[in-house]
Image: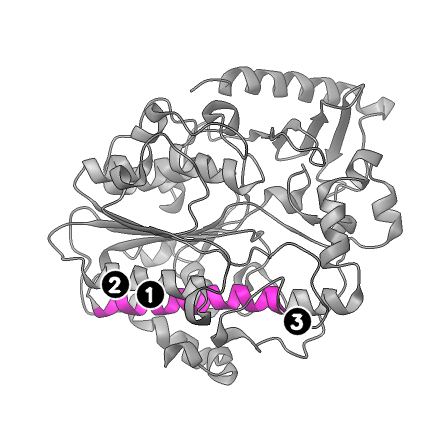
Amino acid sequence: MQSEITRRRFLSSATAAALVRPLWCGAAETPRPGRPNIIFLLADDQRDDMLGCAGHPIIKTPVIDRLAGHGVRFRNAFVTTPICAASRASILTGLTERAHAYTFGKPPVLKVYGQSSYPLRLKEAGYRTGFFGKYGVKMQVDPAEMFDEFAIQDRPYQVGGGRHIDEINAERAMAFLRSSGKDRPFCLSVSFSSPHGEDGNKKPGQHEHYPVIPAALDLYQGVKVPAPRLNGASVFDELPDFLKRSEGRVRFQSYFKDPLKYQSNMQAMFGMISGIDLLIGRILEVLREQGQDQNTVIVYAGDNGFFAGERGLEGKWNHFEQSLRVPLIIHDPRMAVTQRGRVVDSIALNIDLAATLLDYAGVGIPAHYQGRSLVPLVRGEKVKSWRTDFLCEHLMEHARIPKWEGVRDMRHMYARYFQQSPPYEFLHDLKADPDELVNLAQDAGSKGILEAMRKRCDALIAQYAKA
């Protein structure tokens, strides 16, 4: 069975390339004119650097790497809110959390925003739409209105018969592809539960925190995972007390404080990411078998970043780079060869994804969308007035997750945790201090930039308060 692929076979670069070579290496079929198919692949809790193509020294992701090598990878891709509920609502609606007003504990996304979501717009335009995996959003519009076929199923990872939920949802996606004819374009959204961990205090040496699909279970067994680079008491001690007591610290104690648990959990997390890669390879092989590979745009992204012990934290939720940065890769088989394999430095956001998918389909982008289509950047075009900063925020009600709002540009990161009294501000110079170890908010020489960032944050909040 494919799910029982061996470690050696999976890690063989030749085999990994063979799984996907027909998709991009001079296939005889010429891309058909007209509207392309779309496959949108979303990982849960995967930050930007946890891919082989992003330079990770351990993680093996040959299929995703090949997507990047024959497509475009966005080096500066971010979410505007680093938590799955709000981020996934932003992906569907093209709106910031402040506009769609959805996160955990909030009422469903308004019907008007659901009616303009990318899947419903595509469905109305004649696309066959499918969704399989973690949904993570409550909307006033029923999923049955948005998707022709769907199966919303998230954790627990092990379901009936001990099968892994990601494998089941990948197989659903493959069945969707096999039943899609060439007379109607499709948009298939696959939302993996991996590599999100299972919370709770688990025993060391086991995989309960990060249940891996069987095919990738032992890929990293015995691999020594280095300690986090931003590690040690000195880094943690520089955090304000409210972050030292935050949910990120609570979960760190469960996941990563014990060295044995750190090794076991990191090895298993890497296995989950490689498991996603393997399942994507199987999905793309079915796409090739159906003769649809040369007319299908593939998008791979993450819903938020993740702390894997850096700063003595686990999770996301705050303003640091580990929370905000996500992977984003777009592969269009119709691209000119000269445009493939590029790495784009322009800022890309999760709120851009809905506009991008609609643009690929030739469907009008709603005027109230706050994101922009990334298609011109993928094509290598020069885009006038592309953003140089963005609003970011976390507004969920939670006793151990402090609310904040801020703005990040290409040089500075500003955040204010406004529930503190007085509000606690951060200001980082990302050029001089890319690790955000120095807070310049109280630095006399930085008063000018601090005030400018405050005003810019206020302006963006006013701009994005309503769609």
Which element carries disc 3, helix, strand or loop?
A: loop
Would you identify the image quadrant in which residue 282 lies? bottom left
Percent position of residue 378, x then y:
39, 46
Is 429 one of the magenta-colored residues?
no
Circles 3 and 2: CB atoms closer than 8 Å: no
Among the two numbered marks 1 and 3 on one chain, the one whose residue lies closer to the N terminus: 1
Which element carries disc 2, helix, strand or loop?
A: helix
Q: Which residue is mark 1?
A: 171
Q: Which residue in the rendered view is the most extreme toward the left? A: 183
Which element carries disc 1, helix, strand or loop?
A: helix
Residues shaded magenta: 268-289
Q: Amino acid at mark 1?
A: Glu
Is 282 one of the magenta-colored residues?
yes
Residue closer to the observer: 382 or 189: 189
Question: In percent of the image, x 66 and y 34: which residue is there?
Answer: 411
Among the two numbered marks 3 and 2 on one chain, the one whose residue lies closer to the N terminus: 2
Q: Which part of the image, by quadrant, shows the C terminus?
A: top left
Circles 1 and 2: CB atoms closer than 8 Å: yes
Q: Which residue is mark 3?
A: 206
Please say if 184 is above or below 100.
below
Determine the CA span between mark 3 and mark 2: 33 Å
Question: In percent of the image, x 45 and y 34: which residue is there?
Answer: 90
Please say if 455 is above or below 181.
above
Residue closer to the observer: 82 or 353: 82
Q: Which residue is mark 2?
A: 175
Determine the CA span between mark 1 and mark 2: 6 Å
Question: In percent of the image, x 77 and y 63: which residue is there?
Answer: 227
Q: Which class describes the residues within 10 Å of circle 3: few (<14), some (14-19), or many (20+)? A: some
